[in-house]
Image (cartoon, helix red, strand yellow):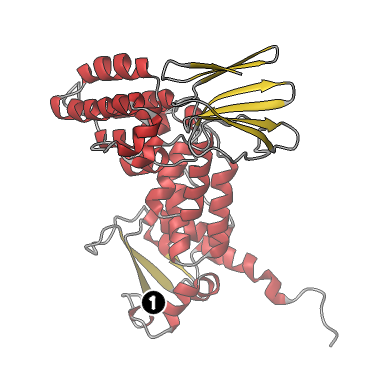
Amino acid sequence: MPPTEELPISSCGEAFRDLYARGELLDVAIRVTEGADGDAAHLPPGEGQLRAHMCVLAAVSPVLRKMLTGGFKESRTLNEAGMRVITLHEVSAVQVKGLLDWIYLGTTDVRSTHELMMLGKLADVLDVQALHERVRQHALKGLNDDTCAETMQSAHDAGLTEINEECLAYALKRFDAVAKTDGFLALSEDVLALLLASDRLESSSEEAVYEHVLRWMHYTPGSPSPNAIRGTELLRHLRFPLMDGQYLALEIHQKTGASLNNQDCALLKNLTTEAALWQIVPAESKHLFKLQHLSRAVLQPRRGSWRFAGSHIRHVLRGHREEVQALKIWEGKLISGSVDWSMSVWDSQSFSCEARLVRHQGAVCALEVRLTYLTSLAPSRERRRG
């Protein structure tokens, strides 16, 4: 008998789909418990929707195959109808129904981002790789400013690391836009802390980051107190020392502090006061400054805060021992002034250092070129001209 072009087994998928829709020859029941205490969940109308074919489940999930064939309790437990019984803990009936529909029908009805992530969590637990990847693709395909925060929180709650990391990277790059959405206000404190603690966060300014966090702190729906706030410990992640001194004193220390209770106001004032003191300490003496409330991490600018769309680093100039406070471009030369009391002259094409001038006894904070004269200023109130 010559071989047929199409094997009979190739139509099995359609046959099982028809059997599932008709509820025929189902030989395994799935019992779900939504809590850790093991109480059975309330099933949706038609308990038969949580029944399936054992061979189908074993084919798509290595975990279910082990449960059914590996000598576990599930391989021996039978219900009144003589069907095998699989018990899945801390899983909802909606998740299982979605999984079965996807297995048999190739599609499932997902009504929210939360449901999608919970379905992805179940696929991850049962090692249904195809569904796990489909959930990931669907979640990231629709990722934008409006959906990022909600998707990130749901993925975090479901333990879907890949989706969570993709959303985190998006939120760090588009922080100002994401922070204006309702989903941002629904973020948990620990998720928001991950964003604020990152050096990769890109924002128009650190002041803008503070305004977004303040809006999140005051969003407390359902709270009996109209002045209730939350998450004040997030303030420790803000880089107050990098903010404008006037904004630090007037907008934050005075105006914002008046809207907080005594304990929260004390934390804010301690952070802003120490930040203001740090700003006025001379650069050459900052290493002697002992921080009491601020962390060393908030003293450094965020790596992404200075970048513009499409920009990239062409070259890194190394020569100063301390931070650079003044720059001037003149006739193809780049002149830099540093808090290490020195000035350097760089070639803008080769990026090599052509000269190093050490004539001040203080940090160089300003440079100006007129004709062939270079004028520099230092906080010692002296002025050098060369």
Residue at the (35%, 15%) spot, across then down: 246
Q: Is residue 291 visible?
A: yes
Relative horizontal placement of residue 292, taking residue 108 as reference (left or right)? left
Viewer-closest of 291 and 216: 291
Quadrant of the rendered image containing residue 85: bottom left
The percent coordinates of residue 244 (x first, y second) are 40, 20
Q: Residue furthest top?
A: 370
Query: Quarter holding the N terminus?
Result: bottom right
Residue flagged by tag 1: what amino acid is it?
Arg
- In the rendering, at what x and y percent does residue 99 appear? 48, 59
Report the residue at 49% width, 22% height from top.
365
Q: Residue placed at 16% from the left, 26% from the top?
A: 224
Residue 97 at x, y = what percent? 44, 57
Vertical relation: 362 (above or below) 90: above
Say if 185 sits above or below 66 in the image.
above
Label 1: few (<14), some or many (≥20) within 10 Å? many
Instruction: Point out the image quarter for the C terminus.
Output: top right
Residue 237 lies, in percent from the top left, at 34, 37
Is 172 placed left or right of 37 in the picture? Answer: right
The residue wearing badge 1 is: 84
Q: Please say whether residue 220 is visible from this viewpoint.
A: no
In the image, residue 258 sits, relative to residue 8, either above or below, namely above
Is 20 on the left-hand or right-hand side of 222?
right
| Residue 350 image-quadrant placement | top right
Name, please, the residue furthest toward the left: 262
Q: Out of 144 and 170, give the one closest to the viewer.
A: 170
- Provide the secondary structure element on which disc 1 rests: strand
Residue furthest right as drawn: 2
The image quadrant that residue 190 belongs to is top left
Residue located 44% across and 49% down the image: 155
